[in-house]
């Protein structure tokens, strides 16, 4: 604020204090000339004063408002403003993406209003203040005071370093929730970025047109790693924000190509931070090594006594079987008695051989 505008702010503070009204807060801290330089967050129930210092000056502010609240924004043009009587100052209420919601103008020594019922969600709004001429001044106020709440300020952007003219020179990996600022420096300049998706989550790629050396839009295109065909794209004009919401199938690497006219400034950002990774996931742990099945223990070699005992057992078993076959063939009584005595002796010998097997072959 310069010269007369500063004097007006000082005088306003003195007058309102004397009248017991809400104090006037000094606002309009330059630079606040666009959507990426917004001043705030503002408070409720306070009169803010500012001024337009150049022909192309435009002052931007932001505020957080409670959901489902009847917000009253009043705009006053002081009588000392040198601008056109009927539309000396203008206030435009915008969404956080820069879209226009409503606007009003105020003639000198008059107050106009924007009355707006906020939707059912805590929302950040933008206020754009303009004057009809250089040196014009304005005052505005948000009521009721309880409708306006505190909130975070704008995070400072990180500059995108050059060179990043191709997919092979892309800057990254980008962090989630962090704005990155870049500029199209030459007529054939192209800026490339890359990032990792953390998994099968939805992410929001935002592109903000800052303005700069041209009034055209900036464009961004999204590519899968290794592909020459873009997945999707978006464009943003100065002081607007565009969104591209997609769901990644899983962890993957993506590239962003930004183009525009020479001098165009922009910002890119990925949200939420949980959907963006900074490194590939750790490889899964190796499966445990297979435990080989124990080899069967070889049977101990039989001792000589054991082998002899088993051989005797087999020999006498065969002898008994032979004697039984002979017994079935003989018919005389004396021969049968003789074979029976022989068979009984063989059976006794077999039992002794079996006992030796039991003893020696344990």
Image (tube, rainbow, N blue to C red):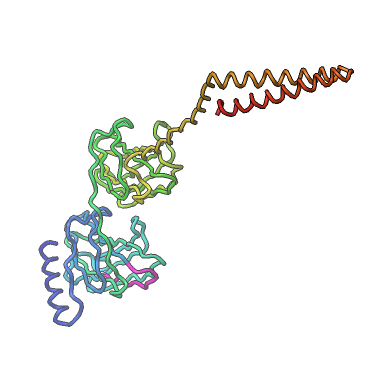
Q: In front: 177, or 242?
A: 177
Percent coordinates x, y for residue 288 in the rendering: 43, 36
Percent coordinates x, y for residue 27 in the rendering: 18, 65
Give me the residue at 52% from left, 28% from top: 296
Percent coordinates x, y for residue 172 in the rendering: 29, 38
Percent coordinates x, y for residue 121 in the rendering: 39, 65
The magenta stretch spans which residues?
Answer: 65-75
On screen, residue 248 versus residue 93, left or right, reads right
Quarter of the image holding residue 313? top right
Prevailing SS of the magenta stretch: strand
On screen, residue 304 versus residue 247, left or right, reads right
| Farthest front residue in view | 334
Look at the picture and state if 40 lies above or below 348: below
Report how many numbered discs are placed on residues in the image.
Answer: 0
On screen, residue 82 versus residue 308, left or right, reads left
Look at the picture and state if 280 lies above or below 93: above
Look at the picture and state if 148 lies above or below 17: above
């Amino acid at each position: 604020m310069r010269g007369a505008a500063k004097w007006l702010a000082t005088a306003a503070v003195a007058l309102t204090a004397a009248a017991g009204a809400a104090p006037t807060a000094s606002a309009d801290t330059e630079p606040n000339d666009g959507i990426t330089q917004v001043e705030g967050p503002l408070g409720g129930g306070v009169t803010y004063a500012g001024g337009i210092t150049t022909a192309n000056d435009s002052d931007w502010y932001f505020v957080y408002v409670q959901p489902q609240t009847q917000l009253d924004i009043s705009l006053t043009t002081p009588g000392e403003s040198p601008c056109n009587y009927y539309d000396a100052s203008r206030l435009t209420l915008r969404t956080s993406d820069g879209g226009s919601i409503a606007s009003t103008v105020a003639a000198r020594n008059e107050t106009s209003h924007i009355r707006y019922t906020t939707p059912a969600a805590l929302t950040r709004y933008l206020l754009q203040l303009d004057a009809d001429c250089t040196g014009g001044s304005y005052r505005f106020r948000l009521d009721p005071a309880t409708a306006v709440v505190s909130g975070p300020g704008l995070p400072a952007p990180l500059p995108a370093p050059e060179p990043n003219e191709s997919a092979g020179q892309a800057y990254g990996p980008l962090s989630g929730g962090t704005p990155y600022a870049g500029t199209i420096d030459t007529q054939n300049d192209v800026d490339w970025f890359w990032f990792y998706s953390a998994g099968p989550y939805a992410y929001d790629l935002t592109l903000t047109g800052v303005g700069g050396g041209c009034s055209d839009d900036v464009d961004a295109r999204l590519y899968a790693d290794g592909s020459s065909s873009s997945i999707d794209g978006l464009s943003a004009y100065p002081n607007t924000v565009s969104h591209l919401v997609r769901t990644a199938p899983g962890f993957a690497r993506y590239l962003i190509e930004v183009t525009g006219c020479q001098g165009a400034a922009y910002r890119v950002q990925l949200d939420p931070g949980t959907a963006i990774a900074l490194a590939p996931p750790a490889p899964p742990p190796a499966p445990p090594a297979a435990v080989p099945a124990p080899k069967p223990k070889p049977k101990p070699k039989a001792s000589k006594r054991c082998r002899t005992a088993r051989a005797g057992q087999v020999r006498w078993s065969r002898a008994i079987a032979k004697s039984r076959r002979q017994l079935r063939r003989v018919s005389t009584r004396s021969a049968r008695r003789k074979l029976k005595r022989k068979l009984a002796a063989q059976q006794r010998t077999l039992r002794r051989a079996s006992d030796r097997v039991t003893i020696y072959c344990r």
